[in-house]
Amino acid sequence: MTIAAISTAKSPAGIGIVRLSGEEAISLACGFFQGKQSLDDPANDRKLLYGHIVSEGEVVDEVLAVAFRAPFSYTGEDMVEIQAHGSRIGLERILNCFISAGAEPAKRGEFTKIAFLNGKLDLTEAEAIIDMIEAESVSAQKQSARQLTGHLYRKIEGFRTRIKDTLAHLVADIDFSTEEVEPVDVSALITTCEAILAEMKALESTFTRGKLVQEGIATAIVGKPNVGKSSFLNKMLREDKAIVTDIPGTTRDVLEASYSLDGIHLRIQDTAGIRKTEDTIEQIGIERAMASMEEADLIIALFDASRPLEEEDMEIIERIKDKRVICLLNKQDLGSVLNKEAMEAYFPGAVIETSFIRDEGLAAVEDLIESWFLSGTIEEDEIQIYSLRHKLLLAEAVESLSKAVEDIRSGIGLDLAEVYVEDAFLKLGEITGQTAGEEVLDHVFSKFCIGK
């Protein structure tokens, strides 16, 4: 079977790509590509050839075409990529030429799934491709690039190799216990398993930071009405994103915005002012503000420094005191009534005096966020996990190997320990794809766009 799809975005662009993969990819392309050089000539493999796509005597587009013969292609099959002008209509006409000649429309992620099945990349590398496409910060793109080049695969396979050796010792001891075979060194077995466990737990612990890098920091701006939440958002974004007025309750819904701070992505939500109100619409906005507070990785709480704390302020403090919070004592230009030292009792080391009228305090806010979330750069060889699928499987592998160590240490017998060690081995194999079932593969590749 040969599949075909448009591999570039739907929006108009200078260049668009139509991709074919399969046994008949080159012959199908040759049926429509006309140029001075032939795609069918092996000497032209992986060379851009100039020509035209012609259908029924009509020129469809002026193109560049390149053929990749198996196994030297993205999918491991014969492939052809047609680089045409980025008109959606033009690209669809080219695609329809190949479909009419017998190619099948590609499904979501089918090119990459074929590449995985042909051993061109493992499952972690396949997942990294879609993560690179969707990356919204430099840090996220770099993290995905490291995974794409096999950093995580090699780490997981290192675990699997050592666990496989352990499994071999257990199986040999169980199967040949009645023969003259040197018994397994239980102490050495426990030491080996504990060393692997320590490394697996260390990798599992990177998930929180890795996820923040990949998905961004969910940031909620909260406070009473008219304390400067929308002004802060506008200052941070360096644009007038939110409406700012002196009328309390101007913001009635959650306003979302994105901001990149030194390569990391912040997903910011400016929320409705929290107060008691009879206004039904405003009440809904306040409920959404509460939900944003619960889900946020970071809360930026604003208080009017020119006025003493009121009941609504104390309610906000009570809700957020156990979360990661930056407290802004705003409106310093009006004079300060709130004592910074007193607020430090609620938010130690995280109280900043601000005045957005005078452009004071924003740099200090950004510096504090960086110190919390960007402490230390990610080294070239540092490995982090950020996929929940990887995290859960790694946790299950840790649990199984821990049970094996417990059984070996307690002297229950090696038979049950062998079952747990094998389970850990299989769980790690699901991460890289060696032991992943069809349902898992379908779920992973369904996240891809058509054409990738």
Image (tube, rainbow, N blue to C red):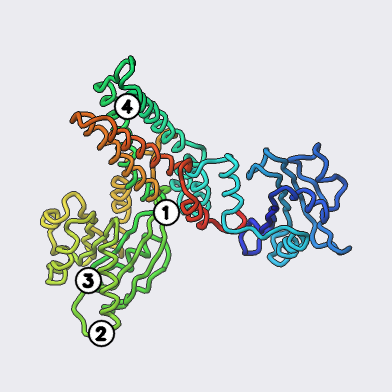
Mark 1 vs mark 3, CA separation in Å = 26 Å
Q: Amino acid at mark 2?
A: Asp
Residue at 24% x, 62% y: name it.
301
- Label 1 crowding class (10 Å Cα cut-off): few <14, some 14-19, many 20+? some
Q: Amino acid at mark 3?
A: Lys
Judge depth for marks 2 and 1 and give the one in front: 2
Q: Earlier in the sequence, mark 2 or mark 3?
A: 3
Mark 1 vs mark 4, CA separation in Å = 57 Å
Judge depth for marks 2 and 3 and give the one in front: 2
Mark 4 vs mark 3, CA separation in Å = 68 Å
Mark 4 touches mark 3? (CB < 8 Å): no
Q: Secondary structure at mark 4?
A: helix
- Label 2 crowding class (10 Å Cα cut-off): few <14, some 14-19, many 20+? few
Mark 1 touches mark 4? (CB < 8 Å): no
Q: Amino acid at mark 4?
A: Ile
Residue nearest the viewer, comparing 84 with 185? 185
Q: Earlier in the sequence, mark 1 or mark 4?
A: 4
Q: Position of residue 289 (x, y in %)?
A: 28, 70
- Label 4 crowding class (10 Å Cα cut-off): few <14, some 14-19, many 20+? some
Where on the picture, by quarter, is residue 354?
Answer: bottom left
Mark 2 vs mark 4, CA separation in Å = 73 Å
Residue at 32% x, 59% y: name it.
219
Residue tagged 3: 224
Residue tagged 1: 260
Question: Does residue 69 lie above or below 311 as drawn?
Answer: above
Judge depth for marks 1 and 4 and give the one in front: 4
Judge depth for marks 2 and 4 and give the one in front: 4
Mark 2 touches mark 4? (CB < 8 Å): no
Give left or right: position of 95 versus 184.
Answer: right
Q: Position of residue 377 (x, y in %)?
A: 38, 39
Residue tagged 4: 174
Residue 279, numbered label: 2
